[in-house]
Image (cartoon, rainbow, N blue to C red):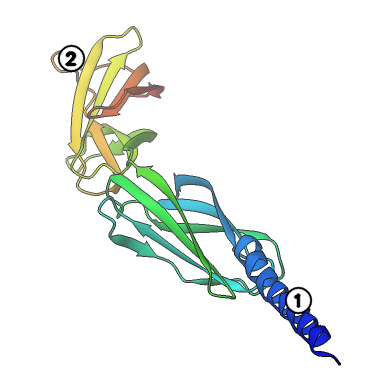
Amino acid sequence: MNKQFYIRYVALLMVFVFTVLLMPVSTMAAGYDGNATLVKSYNKDGKFSMVIDLTCPDNGIGTFEIFLTDASGNVYSRWDTIEAIYSFGTRQYTFSRSYADTPDGQYKMNVVATNGYGNSKNFSWVINHKKTVSVNFKDTYKVKNADGTYSQQFNFTSVNGKGKTYHVELYTNDGKLVKSFSFTDPYNKTNWYTKWNYFPESGVKMKSGSYILKYWVDGGNPKQATITISI
């Protein structure tokens, strides 16, 4: 092998080696990171939840770290790291925490996706969490008092109203105010009631018939229900 041919052979070999070494690096950086997509966030059944689609890296190896931070960047919740060791694809996960124990404010949901080569990609979404107070009329019936008299009991359920005041007003079917009540909620989830002795604010005992019940929480819109009371 002459010297000129040898030099040319070595040069071509080096070009080939560098080409082979560089191609996987470029491919890995572009195509091996996982992906994360926030599908929705919602409040239901006492839970503050975020639904996220996680796509594992092309080679099916990697991890997803999931955590929630507050407006100051402090980690507020952290969920178990998900190991992406299944075949290539997308799976949906729901990440939840207690609705009642999550103060109002702006949060950021974070996902750090890392592939099997140690390359990481960060995903984050801003989420505004605002508690809503709700009150619902359940039912009504006549009850006997300890002194032998009778009252009409109105039953309600309320959520997220700790420290809030609920108002109840009873009207005749033609819109005349009969009686008003109020109740301050000591808990975030409460079953509560108020009683009516069948007398108006002033005057004689009312009669059986159809009545309108209005109820609301401070700052909320009134709801109403038409009920039949037997006195």
Q: Quadrant of residue 14?
A: bottom right
Q: Residues within 10 Å of mark 1 (few under 14, many from 20)?
A: few
The C terminus: image quadrant? top left
Marks 2 and 1 close (CB-CB < 8 Å): no
Q: Is residue 175 left or right of residue 109?
A: left
The CA distance from mark 2 to mark 1 is: 104 Å
* The disc label shown at residue 16, or none: 1
Residue in the foreground of this view, choosing between 98 and 14: 14
Q: How crowded is mark 2: few (under 14 residues within 10 Å), some or many (20 or more)?
A: few
Which dot, 2 or 1, sits closer to the camera?
Answer: 1
Pointer 2 residue: 204
Residue shown at 24% from the left, 49% from the top: 187
Residue shown at 47% from the left, 46% from the top: 41
Q: Which residue lies furthest to the top in this view?
A: 174
Residue in the foreground of this view, choosing between 159 and 28: 28
| SS of the residue under disc 2 | loop
